[in-house]
Image (tube, rainbow, N blue to C red):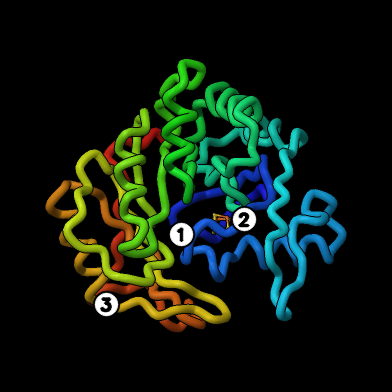
Amino acid sequence: MAESSPIEWTDATWNPVAGCSIASSGCTNCYAMRMAARLEAMGVAKYDGLTRKSGGRAKWTGAVRCDEASLSIPHRWRNPRKVFVNSMSDLFHPEVPIAFIKRVWDVMAETPRHDYQLLTKRPDRMREVLSEDAFRVLPNVWVGTSVEGPEVVGRIDHLRATPAAVRFISFEPLIGPIQDVSLKGIAWAIVGGESGPGARAMQEEWVWEIERLCRRFDTAFFFKQWGEVNKKVSGRLLGGRTYDEMPAYISV
Ligand code: SF4
């Protein structure tokens, strides 16, 4: 779970934490929840007991596991890469101790050749933790939050108030319109529809609204995918072209 990633906007995933719990409606079809159940069934101890079966589907138990052994992984990657931190959890989940977040932070400080992408659905805690003196701003750490619909746009204010070199928003899975929000101070926006079983459709107008916001606030715009049930068929063209913009700052 730590090597190259098929996710369009990163190169690799690194999971020093495993396990999570539902934070909002964007979590309903959480890929990590399904994947954790599969890994447990394959006998991977790191995912043992993190999910249970309910109504024939895997559900998080709420248990969160900090994986000491994975802390050394980025040191072993010689070539610079963009690293998505915790694709199988949320680093700012309330059960992750601040002392462990600090150890993750230290690894990122010790490996400046990599750019790290931290994405959370709990930007209020991220803001609180990263405002502490022990967490100096690192130029190679991008911090982001997920905004799947209008009921969670308040996350953007917490993100904007988080000390960081680069701030970004993942509008994925986009399940509702985002209108009249400020992207001031936000360097990068990713937009994507939901994929996999039970996927909720994304309307094209919602995507264009975010694209217009990006132009207005000088935010790089990355269109990841239409999603729905089969993402390979629905593709990632928007208006006949791809949008793969990245933040202005990039060291990789
Ligand atoms: S915060 Fe992320 S990992 Fe946790 S349940 Fe939601 S989508 Fe899944």
Q: Secondary structure at mark 3?
A: helix
The CA distance from mark 1 to mark 2 is 25 Å
Task: Mark 1 and mark 3 in contact? Answer it, CB < 8 Å.
Answer: no
Three-letter residue code for mark 1: Glu
Crowding near the residue tagged with mark 3, few <14, some 14–19, many ≥20 C-alpha atoms within 10 Å = few
Where does residue 170 sit, x and y in percent of width and height? Answer: 39, 55
Q: Earlier in the sequence, mark 2 or mark 3?
A: 2
Give me the disc on residue 21: 2
Q: Label 1's element?
A: loop
Can residue 107 be seen in the rendering of this structure?
no
Residue type for callout 2 = Ser
Q: Is mark 1 within 8 Å of ligand 1?
A: no
Residue 192 placement (x, y as % from top left): 39, 66
- Image quarter for ligand 1: bottom right
Given the current orientation, which residue lies at the most extreme top position? Answer: 133
Q: Are marks 1 and 2 in contact (CB under 8 Å)?
A: no
Q: Provide the residue designation for mark 3.
A: 204
Residue at image x 51%, y 17%?
Answer: 134
Pick the front one: 87 or 66: 66
Q: Distance of mark 1 from mark 3, alpha carbons?
A: 20 Å
Residue 159, above or below 230: above
Q: Give the quarter of the figure containing the C terminus.
A: top left
The x and y percentages for residue 225 are 40, 70
